[in-house]
């Protein structure tokens, strides 16, 4: 689908690896020249390059799922995760030296031609290039392109995101958090090549620069998150100031959304949640969305286990399995479901940034070093809670609800996490209107 405004067009590039990088690209569809290009499997990519990418993707997804195997699974994942390790944040010091992974990626680009098809293709029209994965951005830099932007998709990143000579980089980094911006400075990226934009969130969930949809949905959500009105009563004037209106009652029942990541890990937690909350589901006190994404195996598992519990998601309005055949359809579907979601339960992936929509997050165990930092960020801004034992969610979920803490967490997400990333990225690419 071509860009809506011909004056605002960019080469938008992502990769098909999990959901995170494509989820970040999805809101930029309106500025994408021709289409969002997937660097590892688009029609323009050579078979040789596809083979290199395929090895990386299969390795990531397989190792993520192996983590759940007792004993050997943790060992294998630990070895893989060490390659993604991120140094301690303190003491702050600039260390621009490239590590082995940086040099390996450079070799794949310069000697083996990784991303060469992509770079040759985008050279046909001089437009800004914005990527949601570091390898296409690095390739553009190493192969001489100017006007290259790279969206950082986690709160902290490995040294591999930056070239071997960071002081000379052509890349402008668009970061989701202050922490990521400081980390890039530690890696030697000049300050004028770093812009803190926030993570790109869906336009249909923010509703434009005035946040019309976001504010409306948060106002609808708060009564469900604060049944005893503890937070709402204490902050009534503040809520009216920022949201414009408050609700005495939500138009939908309390809704919990459990998301399985792109690698399909932690699927069993979703069914454990349903088992624990089954009585409340039958009573109509809560709704649960089990999000399988584009993984048919996960959707089949959910449907099979739900039927074993006597629940048919086709006829039971209390439980829904969210599944789509392709990622674009999945993103559209989950974004719609999030409008009536009250609590998000997910591992701390890129979905952590969706707390900016006014969503409290129950944090499932992180998979990888970057997700551990995302978890710390959620806890730091006050919108995330590490999950308790899912077998007893019927007890601890309502204990926290009665205190008003989930409502407070939703508010912290709204106030402390940037929600205008999509529009700030457009400004970074094309300049602000009127400039």
Image (cartoon, rainbow, N blue to C red):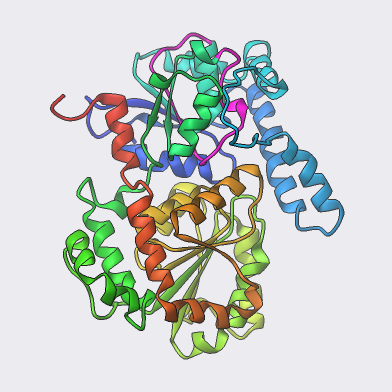
Q: Relative to the observer, which residue lies in front, 66 or 304?
A: 66
Q: Position of residue 20 (x, y in %)?
A: 52, 44
**18 left or right of 359 in image:** right
**Looking at this rendering, what residue extends furthest in the left direction?**
434
Q: Relative to the observer, which residue lies in front, 370 or 288?
A: 370
Q: Position of residue 158 (x, y in %)?
A: 61, 32
Residue 105 lies in the magenta-colored region: no
**Looking at this rendering, what residue extends furthest in the right direction?**
72
**Looking at this rendering, what residue extends furthest in the front direction?**
91
Q: Which residue is drawn at the image coordinates 68% and 15% (left, top)?
A: 107
**244 left or right of 154 in image:** left
Q: Which residue is drawn at the image coordinates 28% and 77% (left, top)?
A: 251
Give the answer, above or below, for where 48 lies relative to 275: above
The image shows a total of numbered marks equal to 0
Q: Position of residue 211 (x, y in %)?
A: 24, 52
Give the answer, above or below, for where 135 lies relative to 69: above
Q: Relative to the observer, which residue lies in front, 176 or 61?
A: 176
Residue 162 lies in the magenta-colored region: yes
Q: Which residues are magenta?
A: 143-165
Q: Quadrant of the N terminus?
A: top left
Is residue 43 visible in the rendered image? The answer is no
Is residue 253 visible in the rendered image? The answer is yes
Q: Which residue is drawn at the image coordinates 35% and 13% (left, top)?
A: 126
Magenta stretch secondary structure, dominant:
loop
Q: Position of residue 410 (x, y in %)?
A: 38, 63
Q: Quadrant of the C terminus?
A: top left
């Amino acid at each position: 689908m071509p860009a809506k405004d011909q004056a605002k067009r960019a080469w938008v590039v992502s990769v098909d690896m999990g959901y995170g990088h494509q989820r970040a690209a999805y809101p930029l569809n309106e500025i994408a020249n021709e289409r969002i290009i997937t660097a590892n499997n688009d029609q323009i990519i050579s078979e040789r390059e596809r083979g290199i990418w395929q090895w990386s993707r299969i390795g990531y997804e397989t190792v993520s799922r192996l983590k759940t195997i007792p004993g050997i699974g943790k060992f294998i994942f630990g070895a893989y995760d060490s390659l993604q390790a991120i140094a301690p944040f303190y003491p702050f010091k600039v260390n621009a030296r490239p590590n082995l992974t940086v040099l390996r990626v450079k070799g794949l680009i310069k000697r083996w031609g990784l991303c060469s098809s992509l770079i040759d293709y985008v050279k046909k029209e001089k437009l800004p290039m914005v990527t949601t994965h570091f390898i296409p951005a690095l390739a553009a830099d190493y192969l001489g392109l100017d006007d290259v932007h790279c969206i950082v998709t986690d709160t902290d990143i490995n040294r591999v995101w930056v070239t071997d000579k960071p002081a000379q980089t052509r890349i402008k980094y668009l970061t989701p958090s202050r922490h990521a911006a400081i980390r890039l400075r530690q890696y030697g990226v000049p300050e004028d090549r770093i812009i803190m934009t926030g993570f790109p969130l869906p336009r249909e969930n923010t509703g434009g620069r005035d946040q019309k949809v976001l504010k409306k949905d948060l106002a609808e959500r708060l009564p469900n998150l604060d049944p005893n009105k503890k937070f709402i009563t204490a902050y009534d004037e503040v809520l009216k100031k920022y949201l414009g209106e408050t609700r005495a009652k939500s138009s939908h029942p309390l809704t919990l959304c459990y998301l399985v990541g792109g690698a399909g890990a932690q699927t069993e937690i979703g069914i454990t949640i349903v088992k624990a909350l089954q009585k409340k589901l039958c009573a109509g006190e809560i709704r649960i969305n089990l999000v399988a994404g584009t993984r048919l195996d996960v959707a089949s598992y959910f449907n099979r286990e739900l039927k074993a519990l006597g629940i048919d998601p086709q006829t039971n309005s209390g439980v829904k399995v969210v599944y789509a055949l392709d990622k674009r359809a999945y993103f559209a579907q989950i974004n719609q479901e999030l409008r009536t979601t009250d609590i998000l339960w997910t591992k701390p992936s890129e979905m952590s940034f969706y707390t900016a929509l006014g969503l409290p997050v129950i944090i499932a165990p992180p998979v990888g070093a970057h997700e551990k930092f995302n978890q710390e960020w959620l806890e730091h801004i006050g919108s995330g809670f590490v999950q308790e034992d899912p077998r007893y969610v019927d007890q601890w979920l309502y204990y926290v609800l009665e205190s008003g803490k989930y409502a407070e967490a939703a508010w912290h997400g709204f106030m402390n996490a940037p929600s205008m990333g999509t529009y700030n990225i457009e400004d970074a690419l094309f300049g602000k209107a009127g400039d």
